[in-house]
Image: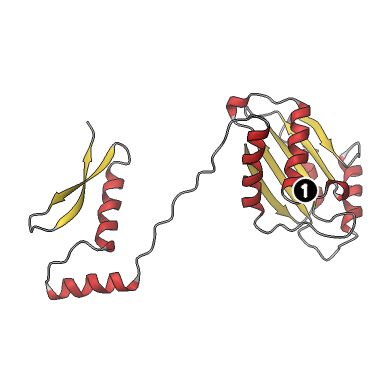
Amino acid sequence: MIPHVEIGTGYKGCLDYIYDTDHKNLKDVEYICGTAIGANTDELLLEFAQSYRLRPALKKCVAHISLSAAPGDGRLDRNTWTKIAEQFLAGIGFDLSQTIYTAVRHGETNHDHIHIAVSRVMLDGSAWDDGRCHKRALRVCRNLEKFHNLTRVESIKPEKKQSLDKTEKSKARNAKKAGKPQPPNKLTLQGWIDEILSKNKKNIRSRIYDQPDGQRGLGSAQSD
C-alpha cells in the first residue's frame, strides 16, 4: 500500500477535488466512510469549518491523504477500505472521536485507491501534529499490509551519493601535484564506480584487478 500525505490551507479545494464537484476529471466517486455527514461538498465544508473556528491561527488546516493498494490486491471491498482508513488515521495520530474527515474511492484508474480529507483541528481545539508524517504513514502502511494480508509495497528512494570529505580531496590534489603514485582513494573509487554504472547499470559485477603500475584498483566485469 502506498500512502501520500499533503498538508493544505483550504478545505474547499480538497473537498472539491476528492468529490470531483465540477465533474472536470470525470472521477467515479464512491463514498467510503467518515465522521462528516454532509450530503454534498457545501454541507461538508460547513462541518469542516466548525473545527477551523476552534483554531483560526492554524493556516495549514487540512490533510489530503491518498492510499493506493498494490495492483495484485485487486479491488478491495468497502468494508475493508473503511477499516484501513480508520486504522491509518488512528495510526498516524488522529483521535477519531474528535476528528472530522471523509473518505472516498476514485474508480477512474486501474489501481484501487481512496482519498481522505481530514481536518487537522480536533473538536477539542487541539491540532494534529504533522511532524514526520510521511515516515509515520509508511510505517502504518507496512502494519496494515500485514493485518489485512495485502501485498507489501516498498518505498523506493534513490540513494544519495556520499560526499567526499575535504581531507580525501586534499590528499588527491597533493598527490597529483607531487607526481606520486597513490592507492585509490574515495575520490578515485567513486569516479570509477560512477563510470561503470553509467555504462551499464545491469549485469555488472565487481572484481579486483592489477593496474599497469602495480596498484590495486576496482574494476568491473560484464556478464554476457
The answer to which image quadrant residue 73 occupies is top right
Q: Nearer the viewer, residue 200 or 126?
A: 126
Please tell me whether residue 36 is drawn above or below residue 61 in the rendered image: above
Residue 191 placement (x, y as % from top left): 27, 57
Compared across the picture, whether 23 is left or right of 197 comes to: right
Is residue 37 left or right of 167 when viewed as pictured? right
Q: Which residue does the image show at 49% across and 48% down from the upper left? A: 157
Q: Confirm whether residue 22 shows in the render.
A: no
Callout 1: helix, strand or loop? Answer: helix
Relative to 171, does residue 215 appear above or below in the rendering?
Answer: above
Is residue 131 visible in the rendered image? The answer is yes
Q: Amino acid at mark 1?
A: Gly
The image quarter containing residue 55 is bottom right
**Residue 13: image location, x then y, percent:** 77, 48
Residue labelled with disc 1 = 13
Q: Quadrant of residue 127?
A: bottom right
Q: How many marks?
A: 1
**Picture coordinates of residue 135, whole percent (x, y):** 62, 51
Assign the C terminus to one quadrant of the image.
top left
Q: In the rendering, at what x and y percent does residue 144 appear?
A: 67, 37
Asked which colour scheme the image uses, the reply is secondary structure
Residue at 90% x, 60% y: name it.
Answer: 54
| Residue placed most toward the observer, 146 or 177 | 146
Give neighbour class at mark 1: few <14, some 14-19, many 20+ (Cα, 10 Å): few
Look at the image and tell me in which quarter the N terminus lies.
top right
Q: Nearer the viewer, residue 15 or 149?
A: 149
Residue at coordinates 82% horizontally, 35% vertically from top-left? Answer: 33
